[in-house]
Amino acid sequence: MIAEPQPAAFPNAVARYVAATRPAFLSVTLVGCLLGLATAHAGGVPLDGAKAFLTVFFALVAHAGVNVVNDYYDALNGSDAANEERLFPFTGGSRFIQNGVLGLREVGIFGYALLLSVTPPGLWLAWHSAPGLLLVGLAGLLVGWAYSAPPFKLMCRGVGELAIVAAWLLVTVGADFVQRGAFAWTPVLAGLPYALLVANILYINQFPDRAADARAGKRTAIVRLGPRRARWGYPAIAGLAYALLAWAAVSGRLPAWTATGLATLPLSLAAARQLLADAERPAALAPAIKQTILATNLHGLIVTVSLFIR
């Protein structure tokens, strides 16, 4: 396991704040954006490099802001501090507040500053694309903020996975919309299986966090169902993701080459088998979490490449 952050490791303030965003986990947003650019390309839309760069960069900034805001609210509700079964760096938050690298107030201000910073480029992209992009962007920010922030606290109400599916589907749809200037179904069909796999990262991460979440009043699906029943949710979500992709490719709603995204199914199955065996032993789940992250990113990249070569 990677060592948790300590103040002495971050003498440089810039490095400290960048690390607090958990940059290694922003890859799912990068891949979601690339997938949206690929669906626009597959639809015959000439890609605008400047728009594509701004879309990807500020989507990453927005995700970074959501990560930091989530740390802030998990510090307020006490779930990260109480998490003794965490598998760092995957679960239990960034530990920046708990280990004294940054203060609670600093983290809160930083998180909201990141979220606010995406407003000007979002307006510029909408001006150069279509007004409907504002709705997509606002919906994405709202879902990301409401995931952890009161009064909604979606992660505490057993619907965190639905919020994640919506958020990452909007990433793909938004990246396509910027280029296309209109709504299309192709990014929905390509993005939904990917968004479901992203949700499975959250889902499996909640097993090591279950005891701390329960003590903090976070009524996640894992807390509500208990690990023995909740463990079946993982293969159900993964199965739905791969089934949707197979249906879309076979039915011609997506190019046939997108079916190559099914190549990551063995990774998801391996993670599912381990979760089914070790749902009540959180310390044993690190390999399954890594496989879930790998399956998700590879799936998105493979489908992206297939759409570019179509």
Image (cartoon, helix red, strand yellow):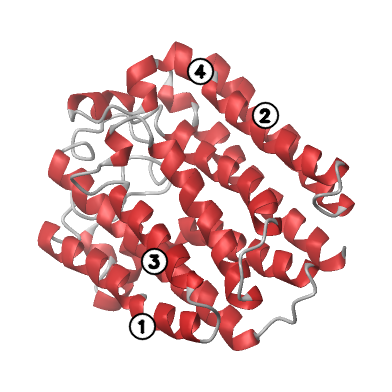
Q: Which residue sits at x=58%, y=61%?
A: 173
* Amino acid type indicated by mark 1: Pro
Q: Which residue sits at x=56%, y=17%?
A: 276
Which mark, residue 278? 4
Residue pointed to by mark 3: 62
Residue 1 shows up from this direction: no
Circle 3 SS class: helix
Q: Which residue sits at x=18%, y=44%?
A: 151
Q: Nearer the viewer, mark 4 or mark 2?
A: 2
Res. 42 image quadrant: bottom right
Which x, y percent locates residue 53?
56, 81
Which mark, residue 232? none
Circle 4 SS class: helix
Q: Nearer the viewer, mark 3 or mark 1?
A: 1
Name the quarter where the C terminus is drawn: bottom right
Which x, y percent locates residue 244?
71, 38
Q: Nearer the viewer, mark 1 or mark 4?
A: 1
Residue pointed to by mark 1: 120
